[in-house]
Amino acid sequence: MHRVAARFLVVAAAVALVSGACGKKEEAAAPAGSPPAKKYRFAVMPKALNLPVFTYARTGAERAAKELGNVEVFWRASENADPLRQKEILESFITQGVDGIAISCTSADLLNDPINKAMDAGIPVVTWDSDAPRSKRIAFWGVDDFKSGQIMGEEAAKLTGGKGKVAFMTSLGAENLARRLEGVKDSLKKYPDMKVVETYDIKEDPTRSAEMIASGMNRYPDLAVWISVGGWPIFVRNALDPIDPAKTKFVCFDTVPPAPDLLKSGKVQVLIGQKYFGWGSEPVKLLAGIREGRMPSQKIIDSGVDVVTKDNVDAYLEQWKKWEKGEE
Amino acid sequence: MAGLAFDGVTKSFGAVRALKGVSFPVAEGETHALVGENGAGKSTLMRVLAGIVRPDGGQLVWQGRKLDLHSPRAALDQGIGMVYQEMLLFPNLTVSGNIFAGREVTGAGGRLREPEMRERTARLLEELHLSVSADAEVASLSTAHQQLVQIARALAFECRILILDEPTTCLTEGETAHLFAILDRLQRRGVTLIYVSHKLDEVFRLCQRITVLRDGEHVGTFEASQTTPRDIVRSMVGRDIDPAARVPRTVPAEAPVVLSVEHLTRRPWFEDVSLSVRAGEIVGLFGLVGSGRSELLETLFGLYRAQSGAMSFAGLPVRFASPVQAIRTGLALVPEERHRQGLFFNLSVRHNLVLPAENASGPWRIDGRRERGDSQRLVEQWRIKTAGVEAPPDSLSGGNQQKVVMAKWLRAAPRLLLLDEPTKGVDVGAKWEIHDLIRRQADQGMGCLVVSSELPEILSLADRIVVLREGRVQGEIPGAGADEESVMRLATAVRH
Amino acid sequence: MNARLQSLWKTRELSTLFVLALEVAFFTWYLWPEGDRAHPFFNLGNGVLILKYSSLYGIAAIGAAMVIISGGVDLAPGAVMALAGVVTGHLFAIQGYPLSVGVAAGIFTGLLSGILSAMLVVLVNLPPFIATLGVMGIARGIAFIITEGRFFDLSSRLPAGWKPFGLPADWLAPIVLVVLAAVFQYLMQRFQWGRAIFAIGGNETAALFSGIRVGKVKASVYIVAAVLASLSGVILVVIQGQGRADLATGYELDIIASAVVGGASLTGGRGSVVGAVLGTLIFGVLRNALPQIPGATFYDRLIVGVVVVVIVVVDQFIARKGA
């Protein structure tokens, strides 16, 4: 009895594993019996799997792959933003010999080494959203963080009439966020009556934003405006509840849903949107081009930003639907 | 002065006074028995000797010098070995590993000298006529072999005093004889043996003198040749009872058949078993180890499915798919190993007493007050010695634990009670009480099927004796007038 | 089942090695590239990578295996790794002490954590699960306090192309792992101390009654485990050149799983150091190979869980069939 049960279990387990694996085989193009045309395997790596903004990048990347026809996208990252894990995954893509890497860096300098190794091994690397400027990467596609920061500063000044207390929200460590903050501070220099009272650091943990906003409003009930260089408060439920929109304004980065709803409800006044779908599609197209000999014309490709307010939010949403479907 | 002397040994565990100034001598080289009811203090006294427990007062003297027994290691180093009642072996180590555990033969820095240890083990095993390999993993050995490995462990190092605590509880007759042969050889070598046991026949066979403890006090030390089992029991219990006496019973002729089993088969344990039990009848099922007795009871109770054959209860054919069904129909099983199968050690005595009845037929909600009342009544009715119904079962002695198991089943008033080795590991006084309880239940019309490997127990209890051998019924004889020989003949199928 | 095969399987080192070989063979087949492309999985660079990253788990798994064999369990390795790494990083990169001082301090924190665990388990008699859970929280907490949640960066202070002890940086961890695994395997099998650990795990009461110094041996096991974890954390931070307080989060479960897959039984008394190390390799291969399966982004955890269950269940059936 036990003998039979044991054998059955071993076979069943093996079958389950293999069929599970085969199931995934269907999803991807089957290795054997595929068309003889060469398929490029590109690794597209966001900072983490748990940051909602990146899901749109994935859509963009996979759509671009389908359009191009000869590209296979490997979407890979650790669940939480973990620079060491990202380095590990990057290194394993190198030893696996992928044809191109597009990466949003959790920590710029940490990844210089593996990026350079990839370039030396003949694997083209482009960065998006968050750059590694001191590495050998071919190009960067994303917003000009400094400029977008400046725009945020200007919008904040417009909202408050150029005076009042200001609180920043950021996550120390990421270069792109640091640059944005520089841009904000730069434009605020023109408004000496706007005083920065505190810079809140969510330490890469989006859920902290709610705490920070609550304690911020507690300490500075007369705060004029919040400037958040990342979209974290949007994705945490009720994070913005402690804010009274009549007294305190909110300028935030990122326009991905449910941000537009917050605009409509009045909790947030200005949103700076990045080109989320482009994060996925453009680097993939760049890599495909590079593989066929077409190098990008410049190292830093500014994707541009969208400034969204209550006035133009509906138009923006219409545009969003078009992007999702793949129409530019 | 040669020999071992216990001198005023006193020990209390909190409020419980386990030993109250126990003093008696043990001659060097003799085999000395230590008997007493559960809770009399035998185990505690032996633990003091083995260095596991430090006494509050008194001392132990060996050959005129005071023994320093501050740890098990100290006792071992002074040549005192103990074979414990519970299996204190390392199931994950080999025989050799077990024998030398804690006292390995080592080289520099504690490096093990395996070949030397294996060789010494092999020699020891040979000496004890134990056909087991030194490299065998202990977990794979039979209980009897494990017991003998424990003994080998105690003997591996020079042992001047060897304590044996209920060594034959799990052994068959053959294995017991083997053990006694080893003990005889040890006696001839001059080892002092202290034999703790409930089995008086063994005590009288082996020992020169017998010490009786009762309630932590020394009652007396007797020469075996000048006393009888009855005297000993009287000293142990403080009452005069004859443990082997048979109480004559009559089963009314019109008593209906409660259980009828026909050609029941479950390979490889038993085959073609047919028997019946009537209301008010005590049927004894005797067989040696391997005869399939426990498996038969478990199948009757619904724990396992029979492969073929039929069972009927009070005239109606039944086929139990689970114990819950069996319980609802009116059966109850008091299992062989109360530790593993009968008691919940993480619950209190109260919970243990009330569990099955509720389980099978009770209401959803637990009525705490009713529970406490019921369990209190049962404790009184059965004279269970416990520090209250909230006490955990492991604070009770073996005999009282067994009473809890029986009480819990009888609360549900079954019509048929299956008992598997009901007095295993139980002291004489409690044994007598349990037998009495079984008879009284039978007198009230309950049918009882008692499985036992203790022949005296079967002979004193059963109205009818069914003998099993290797899974088959060898024969049936009436209880009155049966004797050891006739039963054993059937059990071993020796033809004269 | 053939008794000889059964006893061979019972040699945990062999059976785990067999599973590892099976795994490698499977992925080599499954990820076979089309055309003239080089094999993405079965190549030297990838093998070195797997070794490098698995070693960090592996060094700590040596200690974890010994704790489990003694009948206990250790939930602290991840946190101790992080704390040791943070201490080293803080002293070297921020305070400016020489690297050797930082490393020594990191390992010393491991020693302290181990002593804390040992005291809680042996003196206070807490169940090891709770004791090490507490130490895990304390270690992780102190790490956060030291770093204030920020990154610290060592790479700027290390010379480029730095070779610790003359070895390429990538090889440091695997070599340390191999050496330590050999040493501890030998100790466990051939020394009284190791035998005592097995005995305590097999039957602690019997060990006590046999005169084995149960308290001392148990304490030593927890201390060794923590020191090994701290060593792993120090190496991690030095090799990667960067660190943070939330390093090695969740590693303890992978480490325990590796030990179990390598033959350790959570009830104590059974297991193997080498088996645990091979167990970490089994997981390391999975972590490396799974990302190469397109479309399987979110399946990693599921597959790892299934693999653990299958290996343990199959092992139970095969090893116990004789009983």
Image: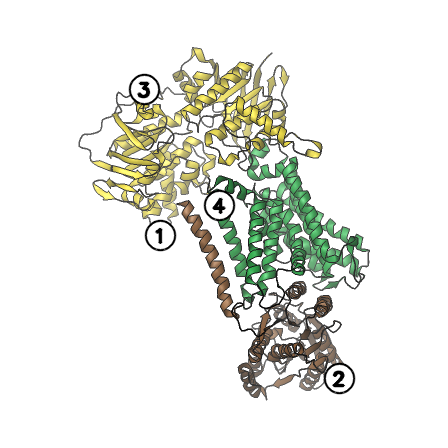
Chain colours: A brown, B yellow, C green
Which chain does the residue under circle 1 lie in? B
Residue A191 numbered mark, or none: 2
Residue highlighted by disc 1? B364
Q: Secondary structure at mark 2?
A: loop
The correct choice, above or below, for B75 with respect to A270 in the image is: above
The quarter in which the N terminus of chain B is drawn is top right
Number of marks present in the image shown: 4
Give the foreground label among 2 and 3. 3
Alpha carbon separation for disc pair 4 and 3: 46 Å
Alpha carbon separation for disc pair 3 and 1: 53 Å
Q: Are discs 2 and 4 less than 8 Å apart at CB?
A: no
Would you identify the image quadrant in which residue B387 lies? top left
Q: Are marks 4 and 3 on the same chain?
A: no
Please state which of residues B354 and C20 is positioned toward the viewer in this rendering. Answer: C20
Q: Residue at x 57, y 17 (%)?
A: B5
The correct choice, above or below, for C187 with respect to A161 in the image is: above
Give the foreground label among 2 and 4. 4
Give the foreground label among 3 and 1. 3
Please provide percent x and percent y for residue A95. Answer: 66, 64
Please provide percent x and percent y for residue C152. Answer: 74, 63
Q: Decide: few, some or many residues near mark 4? Use Cα within 10 Å; few <14, some 14-19, many ≥20.
A: many
Q: Residue at x 38, y 44 (%)?
A: B355
Q: Is residue C83 left or right of residue B83?
A: right
Residue highlighted by disc 3? B485
Residue highlighted by disc 4? C318
Would you identify the image quadrant in which residue A161 lies? bottom right
